[in-house]
Amino acid sequence: MIIHEVTEKNFEEERKKGEAVVQKKFDAWDKLGKVNISIDEFKAKAAYLMRDPTIWAYATLKDKQNKQLESYYFQDKIMNDRHRFIHCTAANQIGKTWGAGIIKGAHHALHVNNASVMLISRSEGQAKGILDEIKWMFKRAKIDYTPFEDEITNRLEYHIKSPDGIGTSAIRVFPPTLAILSFPATLVIKDETGFWESKTCTMNPIAYYQQCVEPRTNATKNWKHPFLTMGQIVSITNPNGQDGLAWWLRNNPEFHNYTYNWLANPNNTLEEYKAKEKSLPAIRFASVYAATYLLASGGFIDLTQYERFKSYNCPLVIKPGYTMFLGGDFASEEPKSKGTDWTVLYGIIPIKNIDFPQNPRLRVVYRKEFAPKTK
């Protein structure tokens, strides 16, 4: 289900509406500091306002320039969505991991007794980097978070004292491996899901999600909390073509879907966006800036695509004057499949792409199949 999208067509309107929403939240906190009330009443009202991660971050944290942390409107929307399953597709470097990952994860750990926050990124190095950012965020905060720290802290794990003062909440980071099976999770944040690879996951990323990730929350989803969703799963990523885990989540009706292109960030301009659209290949622009799942040209051609090509009434004729490129989908050498797997040879020619001249289209002009065991 599409909940919110910011595109080239609507970014100005969405920026204006969204910024008005978060400004009201900032104003509510600023107003509280000016009201003449008792300390106990102030603490009660402050605690209530800080149920919202956007207000909590504004009230207690600083950004990397040591200024009061003001979340963007699109971060606010994702962080405050209480649906159990959320998938956010966004452009590069607009703040998706900072908001939906770092702020939301830290806020959850501080407000849930015995919380288990699981952050999974595409590699161990990136996972460690996210936890490092959380630690640095606490160190430069407007208030001293040292009393909240518990005994364990390392590059992969960070423990915080629970709100009840008895238990311990943990933030743990992982690459997409079977190591997550050792822990339950009250919140799972999946970073760069469009780029998880089977060689890291040890299984297909979709199967890994179904068998390993979601079941980490099957018990904790039944926990009760006054204002946070237990067992919530949040995915954040750049798109990576119409394939893989991110594309599967995008089309999963259980998930609330959000899409934010590069123009969602109010610091970016349409002129820069258009310049990149002209200079980059379409597939690269779609992933880095437009935040769209583009069907990549080229690569392997399967039978479904071939049948679609045939429906365009383009005969398989090798015309003179063209440079033809050959590509093979070769039969497997695996003992179980080499007796049934066919080899297919394709011939393609480049043709002009009117929309993106720097990225020509490919036309199939030759196709030949070779039966299993053909030498």
Image (cartoon, rainbow, N blue to C red):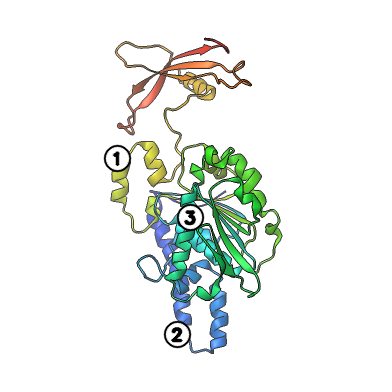
> Which quadrant of the figure has residue 335?
top right
Q: Are marks 3 and 2 in contact (CB under 8 Å)?
A: no
Q: Please identify, in this view, whether the residue under mark 1 or under mark 3 is nearer the observer.
A: 3
Camera-side residue: 267 or 331? 331
Q: Left or right? Give the position of 362 relative to 157.
A: left
Mark 2: which amino acid? Lys
Q: Residue at 58% across / 81% down in the picture?
A: 44
Q: Secondary structure at mark 3?
A: helix
Q: Residue at 54% across / 44% down in the picture?
A: 250
**Residue 371 pos. (x, y %):** 56, 11
The answer to whether 327 is drawn above or below residue 215 in the figure is: above
The answer to whether 19 is drawn above or below residue 12 in the figure is: below
Which residue is tagged 3? 128
Which residue is tagged 2? 34
Q: Residues within 10 Å of mark 2 (few under 14, many from 20)?
A: few
Mark 1 or mark 3, earlier in chain: 3
Q: Left or right? Give the position of 326 relative to 41.
A: left
> Which quadrant of the figure has residue 318?
top left
Which residue is tagged 1? 278
Q: Please identify, in this view, whether the residue under mark 3 or under mark 2 is nearer the observer.
A: 3
Question: CA–CA distance between discs 3 and 2?
Answer: 40 Å
**Residue 118 pos. (x, y %):** 58, 56
Question: CA–CA distance between discs 1 and 2?
Answer: 51 Å
Q: Is residue 98 visible?
A: yes
> Which quadrant of the figure has residue 217?
bottom right
Camera-side residue: 213 or 157? 157
Question: CA–CA distance between discs 1 and 3?
Answer: 35 Å
Mark 3: which amino acid? Lys
Mark 1 or mark 2, earlier in chain: 2
**Residue 203 pos. (x, y %):** 59, 38
Q: Left or right? Give the position of 344 relative to 268.
A: right
**Residue 353 pos. (x, y %):** 34, 29
